[in-house]
């Protein structure tokens, strides 16, 4: 399974990233509930909020949404303490996303390689590079 970070979702929603170039017909894509929050926030801040929320609803109907559950929360706590000791802390939302990805044994599709490469064991790919 591949999980889309918010930056990839934004490019899909804006028509700058065509999934047909990257995804096999039977492949499952997902996003995290954290990304849903980030995307919803962005849509509400937009001058075309209703249009963007409608586009977001259609997009969310086509992907699985993975929760930030207890397992992910425990992974988050471990990773945050680990990164604090190592001096490589990243933002809590990004770390929550990474925790969900790791708990689902998935690959994160993100353009934010600099932050996410600090997370031990997290596999990433960048379709925007």
Image: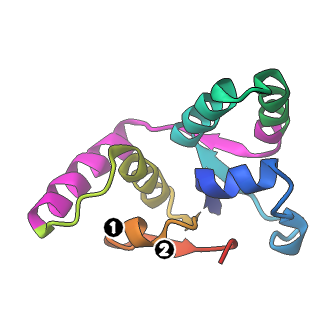
Residue under the point 13% across and 69% down: 86
If the image is split into quadrants, where does the C terminus sit?
bottom right
Residue 126: horizontal and vertical position, in percent?
A: 62, 74
**Residue position marked by numbered label 1 in the rendering:** 119
Q: Which numbered disc covers residue 123?
A: 2
Q: Quadrant of the N terminus?
A: bottom right
- Predominant secondary structure, magenta span: helix
Is 114 on the left or on the right of 23, as rendered? left
Q: Is residue 100 magenta?
A: no
Q: Find numbered disc 2 in the image and state the secondary structure of the residue it sits on.
A: strand
Task: State how far apart marks 2 and 1 are (Cα).
Answer: 9 Å
Query: What x and y, as percent, mark residue 67?
Result: 52, 37
Q: Is residue 69 magenta?
A: yes
Q: Position of residue 105 (x, y in %)?
A: 50, 64
Q: Nearer the viewer, residue 29 or 88?
A: 88
Circles 2 and 1 in contact, beta carbons < 8 Å = no
Q: Residue furthest bottom?
A: 129
Which residue is pictured at 67% across the width and 58% down the height?
Answer: 8
Residue 78: assigned label: none
Q: Using residue 25 as the reference point, say whether residue 43 is left or right of it.
A: left
Image label count = 2
Q: Position of residue 42 (x, y in %)?
A: 63, 34
Q: Please, is residue 96 above or below residue 68 in the view?
A: below
Residue 43 located left or right of residue 88? right
Residue drawn at 59 percent across, 29 percent down:
41
Q: Quadrant of residue 79?
A: bottom left
Residue extent of the magenta highlight:
59-85
The one nearer the camera, 41 or 22, is 41
């Amino acid at each position: 399974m591949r999980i889309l970070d918010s930056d990839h979702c934004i490019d899909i929603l804006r028509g700058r990233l065509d999934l047909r170039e990257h995804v096999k017909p039977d492949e499952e894509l997902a996003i995290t509930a954290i990304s849903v929050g980030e995307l919803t926030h962005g849509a509400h801040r937009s001058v075309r909020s209703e249009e963007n929320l409608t586009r977001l609803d259609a997009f969310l109907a086509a992907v699985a949404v993975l929760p930030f559950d207890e397992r992910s929360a425990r992974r988050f706590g471990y990773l945050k303490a680990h990164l604090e000791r190592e001096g490589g802390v990243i933002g809590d939302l990004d770390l929550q996303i990474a925790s969900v990805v790791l708990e689902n044994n998935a690959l994160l599709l993100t353009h934010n390689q600099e932050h996410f490469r600090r997370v031990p064991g997290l596999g990433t790919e960048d379709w925007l590079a």
